[in-house]
Amino acid sequence: MTIATASSHASPQPDTPALSRYRRMAWITLAALYFLIMVGASVRASGAGMGCPDWPTCFGSWIPPTSVEQLPANYQEIYADLGYAETEFNVVKTWTEYLNRLTGVTIGFMILLTAIYSWSVRAHDKSILTASVAAFLMVGFQGWLGSRVVASNLQPGMITLHMLMALAIVGTLLFAVARARRGIMMAESIASIDPRFEKWLYIVMGLTVLQVAMGTQVREMVDYLNHQQGTERSAWVAALPWFFYVHRSFSAVVLFANLWLGWLLLRSLGWQHALTRMTAAMIGVIVLSVVTGATLGHLGMPAFVQPLHLVGASLLFGLQFLIWMSYGHARAAGAEVGVARA
């Protein structure tokens, strides 16, 4: 009786139409979140971050103006009194920022829909519902944080906090998706996995945290050079401190550590295993990050490359988190099988 009960726990829970629908909606929402991260980075790189000097309205209206003639003649004095002395209407920058905000609102509704979908799978795994609702509540806080970013006149620290909150939302949704994929990963045997994999997984995750932390410092320094000192873009690299060069060189360490991780999986589990494929995707993202980082460092920080580099770092975070969760589920299934056999 004990063996039969243990075996039933070890077998993966059956997939259901509700779970399938939830995963589909959650994946679409995650893709939209990454799109929003890219859009936000593009707004920042193009200098359109203060295209709307107020929030949630834009130049005092829910729909921004299309020409300076639609604004009061003394609009610059009005905004100077509010602390934005250099406000100058630019229709391209204004509508770029406004469309960024509309994209954020749209994705907020998508996250709400994801939370609604999670209600139908609460009996399967209550943590899916909890994480999905938490992600929606975090979006509300992110909206308020966005207003603080504008109020701070794009202070680098506030921008970094805003970005970290976006990654927290991504991580929360990824947690829910991983839980919704738990049955799939439980069916993926890791009995033959290289015993060094787990140690190296934690090593590469630690290296990524260190690399992203240095990248955050580089980004804040670039913001300082651009907005506080008015340094020309072509001179940014020469003005950056030592940690920029450490960050640039350290990317090779991150790449080779992840290549080794992928090799461990390929040799022990084969290409068809889900963990191997996710790790291959992660290596592809690292290559993208290395290429875009080299382009930024050697070609004078071209604006169109900055969003790609940031999205690459965000994708790397997401994939490593998903691999860690998925490995944990597969390992738990293997442990239950071992107990059942004992």
Image (cartoon, rainbow, N blue to C red):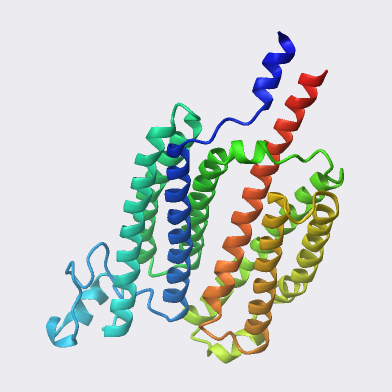
Rendered position, 299 above or below 221: below
Quarter placement of the C terminus: top right
In front: 186, or 31? 186
Image location (x, y in percent) of residue 335 = 76, 28
Could you tell me which residue is drawn at 44 percent across and 43 percent down? Answer: 22
Query: Can residue 85 be seen from the camera position used here?
Result: no
Could you tell me which residue is drawn at 67 percent across and 37 percent down? Answer: 187
Q: Quadrant of residue 93?
A: bottom left
Quarter placement of the N terminus: top right
Image location (x, y in percent) of residue 80 = 26, 76
Rendered position, 131 above or below 57: above
Image location (x, y in percent) of residue 140 = 35, 49
Q: Quadrant of residue 2?
A: top right
Q: Quadrant of residue 137?
A: top left
Rendered position, 267 above or below 9: below
Could you tell me which residue is drawn at 81 percent across and 56 percent down? Answer: 266
How many numbered marks, from 0 up?
Answer: 0
Left or right: where 212 falls relative to 204: left
In front: 265, or 228? 265
Left or right: where 43 falls relative to 267: left
